[in-house]
């Protein structure tokens, strides 16, 4: 209440001061106006009175003057009238003046001596009088004066009335100030604060999870925002703690972001972590005049962000957004996540030539087709190789700069864009622990050997202490390639390459998804997606649905998939008009001609199959050529009877795992290429050879005709795999291995 009292006192002081100032000036103006009005009245009467009195002074009747004065006094509400001779002696006066004036008022003398009307306010006992005196003449000479006395006490009464009114106004104002202040404070502050405190108490006891009860107005907005953030964090922490407790209770080994955080902290022992990737976790993009922050839909970001949130390191990545340059601070750094900064994002900016040569050229026209056996010839241009080396050096310089002052830094390099980076870093910082994770397949030595710079690439990679692949076959291929291309000693038991005294461990770390991202929020059960209605949104009447989700890439086997749908409908015509395949094809790398050609080819193939079978209300393929949100993808995954992943060669393939993670109804069949890394884990999918159209068509039929019991059994088994081998486990294993491996060769016994 002290706040209320201070607030009231301040308001009262201001109100009283302002009101008194106004009242003072009002009283002053009123007094002046009343006096002027009285003076005017006296002058007007004086002019008529002057002539009559002059005439009556020479009247022989001595009572005539007195009678006249009495009449005038009554008629004009005068207090009194007196007539004086030129010496100031009273000649006649109305009775009210008798004895009232002890002395001759000076104004009468002045009127006589100055021969003009003069007025003055005089106090007569308790009464205030206004006396107006006019000279009397006989011929040119002044013979005396007539004085008119007005009772002017009403002027003081009027002024007193003004002050009285002011006083009562103030009393009323102060009353309302006190009342309103108390009410406002009670409603706006005390009420809200009490509600907030009650809500916090309930929240603390766990009996409420409702939103904070604060209004969203200007006064409470910042507080409400902070409280919202705080409770969201507390809710997440509480949920994580409960989950951990449940896990301990059920002795399961599920990985959560919270568990990953604890694990990474323990492994890194307060050391910061450095991550290098081509893709950045936060992209700034211009949107009209404003700038928008976008989190790219990427499994890599999902996996690595919790690690960086745990250990406050630095993520070095290509600043690819069109507003990225204007949103960095000194040293091209910024703190992220934007609304709750925890780690540093260091952006590396590339010239258009560098980006073309390093990213589109060497990485995506050279290494990508080199590593994927999809029968697409890699293109190796010397200029692209130059750019690849330059950009790798540029990223290495940025990483080294960031690592300055950190002892034994731990570095996680991502993907085929940075094969040279491990060597570049280790040359400068031999004590750093460096791992590189290769997200795409590693082909057999003969296939890799066609790269003119295979030795340089291998040398760069072997700078690392740890190299990760998705599956064992890729590890094997890598070691075989090293064996054939370089002078080294390979320990096949331990999967270690010994070269020039340095050991590089090669391990498999199958990447995965965050199942929670595709599942509905914990504790909620969304209604099943209406498949028929969803297809109707796309202009199709059908009851059965297949789904495919891919970046449009020639490794993903999209035309093969469409041909399989064609063959299926041809072989089993009963399904015509009943089954539709929905393909999401997010355009990718479309500055490269081959990818543009592929976009056209996929579209033409869909049109061809549609033209062959379509009816007015049905078609076999719905091809959506745009990027979709994860929520939209989850809806398609949930609605489908089957999902087709027909990659011709794929490191892992996250779509297969996303489909499984989205199916909390434990239904749906996954048709999965044996050439995708995911096929090694998801054994309960229908494993297919995507080049075998006949087999693919049969797989579609088998999926659509599978009994619900078998569908559920298979999906349950796959869901267990995805839940346990999730993306957090991938990150945890990678970091644990990197921090624990021995980087020097153990000395032989004799050397001890
Ligand atoms: C490489 C390796 C490895 C697709 N369309 C949309 C969209 N996507 C998302 C999917 C999925 C991701 O893109 C694709 O992941 P993949 O694993 O299938 O393939 P790559 O992009 O080739 O990734 C691969 C992966 O690295 C991880 O190591 O598995 O083998 O080639 O998450 O959902 N996402 C959004 N809209 C779309 O329209 N938001």
Image: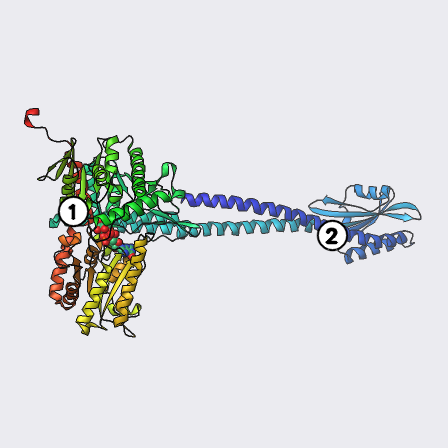
The location of residue 97, given as percent across then percent down, is 77, 49
Q: Is residue 648 left or right of residue 333?
A: left
Residue drawn at x 30%, y 70% is 539
Q: Crowding near pointer 1: few (<14 within 10 Å), some, many (20+)?
A: some
Q: Secondary structure at mark 2?
A: helix
Q: Quadrant of the C terminus?
A: top left
Residue drawn at x 72%, y 49% is 35
Circle 2 sits on which residue? 37
Residue 640 visible to the viewer: no
Instruction: Name which of mark 2 and mark 1 comes first in the sequence.
Output: 2
The location of residue 712, given as percent across then percent down, is 13, 62
Q: Residue furthest right?
A: 139
Q: Is residue 14 left or right of residue 511?
A: right
Q: Where, by quadrant of the figure, is residue 527 drawn?
A: bottom left
Question: 228 or 644, which is in the foreground?
Answer: 644
Question: 124 or 471, which is in the foreground?
Answer: 471
Front label number (2 vs 1): 1
Q: Secondary structure at mark 1?
A: loop
Question: 423 or 411, which is in the foreground?
Answer: 423
**Looking at the image, how many numbered discs can be counted on the residues?**
2
The location of residue 198, given as percent across then percent down, is 30, 51
**Display coloring:** rainbow
> Alpha-carbon distance for marks 2 and 1?
117 Å
Q: Where, by quadrant of the figure, is residue 720 drawn?
A: bottom left
The location of residue 32, given as percent across then percent down, is 70, 48
Look at the numbered disc 2 and say if its residue's Cβ is closer than 8 Å to ligand 1.
Answer: no
Question: 440 or 528, which is in the foreground?
Answer: 440
Q: Quadrant of the N terminus?
A: top left
Circle 1 sits on which residue? 444
């Amino acid at each position: 209440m002290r706040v209320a009292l201070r607030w009231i006192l301040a308001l009262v002081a201001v109100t009283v001061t302002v009101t008194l100032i106004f009242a003072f000036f009002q009283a002053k103006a009123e007094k002046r106006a009343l006096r002027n009005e009285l003076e005017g009245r006296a002058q007007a009467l004086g002019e008529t009175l002057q002539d009559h009195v002059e005439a009556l002074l020479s009247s022989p009747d001595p009572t005539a003057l007195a009678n006249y004065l009495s009449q005038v006094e009554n008629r004009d509400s005068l207090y009194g009238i007196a007539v004086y001779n030129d010496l100031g002696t009273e000649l006649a006066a109305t009775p009210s003046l008798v004895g009232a004036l002890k002395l001759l008022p000076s104004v009468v003398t002045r009127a006589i001596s100055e021969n003009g009307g003069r007025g003055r306010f005089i106090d007569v006992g308790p009464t205030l009088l206004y006396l107006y005196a006019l000279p009397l003449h006989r011929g040119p000479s002044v013979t005396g004066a007539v004085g008119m006395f007005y009772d002017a006490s009403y002027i003081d009464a009027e002024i007193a009335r003004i002050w009285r009114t002011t006083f009562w106004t103030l009393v009323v104002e102060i009353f309302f100030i006190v009342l309103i202040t108390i009410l406002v404070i009670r409603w706006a502050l005390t009420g809200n604060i009490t509600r907030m405190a009650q809500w916090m108490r309930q929240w603390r006891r766990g009996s409420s999870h409702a939103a904070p009860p604060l209004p969203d107005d200007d006064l409470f907005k910042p507080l409400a925002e902070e409280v919202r953030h705080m409770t969201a964090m507390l809710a997440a922490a509480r949920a994580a703690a409960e989950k951990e407790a449940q896990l301990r209770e059920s002795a399961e080994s599920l990985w959560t972001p919270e568990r990953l955080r604890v694990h990474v902290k323990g492994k890194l022992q307060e050391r910061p972590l450095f991550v290098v990737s081509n893709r950045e976790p936060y992209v700034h993009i211009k949107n009209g005049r404003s700038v928008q922050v976008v989190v790219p839909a990427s499994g890599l970001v999902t996996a690595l962000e919790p690690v960086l949130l745990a250990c406050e390191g630095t993520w070095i990545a290509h600043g690819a957004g069109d507003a990225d340059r204007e949103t960095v601070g000194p040293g091209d750094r910024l703190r992220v996540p934007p609304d709750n900064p925890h780690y540093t994002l260091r952006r590396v900016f590339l010239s258009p030539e560098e980006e073309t040569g390093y990213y589109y050229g060497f990485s995506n026209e050279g290494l990508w087709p080199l590593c994927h056996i999809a029968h697409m010839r890699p293109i190796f241009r010397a200029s692209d190789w130059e750019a690849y080396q330059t950009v790798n050096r540029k990223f290495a310089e940025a990483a080294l700069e960031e690592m300055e002052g950190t002892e034994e830094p731990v570095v996680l390099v991502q993907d085929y864009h940075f094969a040279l980076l491990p060597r570049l870093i280790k040359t400068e910082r031999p004590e750093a622990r460096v791992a590189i994770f290769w997200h795409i397949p590693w082909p057999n030595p003969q296939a890799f050997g066609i790269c003119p710079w295979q030795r340089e690439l291998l040398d760069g990679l072997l700078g690392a202490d740890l190299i990760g692949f998705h599956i064992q076959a890729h590890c094997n291929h890598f070691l075989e390639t090293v064996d054939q291309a370089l002078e080294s000693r390979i320990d096949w038991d331990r999967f270690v390459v010994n070269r020039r005294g340095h050991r590089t461990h090669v391990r498999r770390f199958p990447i995965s998804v965050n199942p929670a991202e595709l599942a509905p929020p914990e504790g909620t059960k969304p209604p099943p997606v209406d498949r028929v209605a969803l297809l109707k949104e796309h202009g199709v009447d059908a009851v059965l649905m297949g789904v495919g989700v891919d970046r449009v890439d020639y490794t993903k086997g999209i035309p093969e998939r469409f041909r399989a749908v064609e063959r299926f409908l041809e072989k089993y015509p009963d399904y015509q008009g009943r089954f539709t395949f929905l393909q999401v094809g997010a355009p990718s790398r479309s500055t490269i001609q081959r990818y543009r050609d592929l976009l056209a080819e996929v579209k033409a193939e869909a049109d061809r199959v549609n033209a062959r079978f379509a009816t007015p209300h049905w078609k076999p393929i719905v091809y959506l050529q745009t990027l979709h949100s994860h929520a939209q993808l989850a809806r398609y995954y949930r609605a489908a009877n089957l999902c087709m992943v027909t990659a011709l060669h794929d490191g892992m393939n996250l779509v297969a795992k996303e489909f499984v993670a989205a199916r909390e109804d434990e239904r749906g069949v996954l048709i999965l290429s044996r050439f995708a890394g995911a096929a090694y884990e998801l054994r309960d999918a229908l494993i297919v050879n995507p080049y075998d159209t006949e087999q693919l068509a049969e797989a579609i039929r088998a999926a659509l005709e599978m009994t619900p019991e078998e569908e559920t059994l298979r999906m349950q088994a796959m869901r267990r795999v995805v839940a346990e081998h999730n993306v957090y486990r991938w990150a945890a294993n990678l970091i644990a291995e990197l921090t624990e491996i021995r980087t020097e060769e153990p000395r032989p016994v004799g050397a001890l």
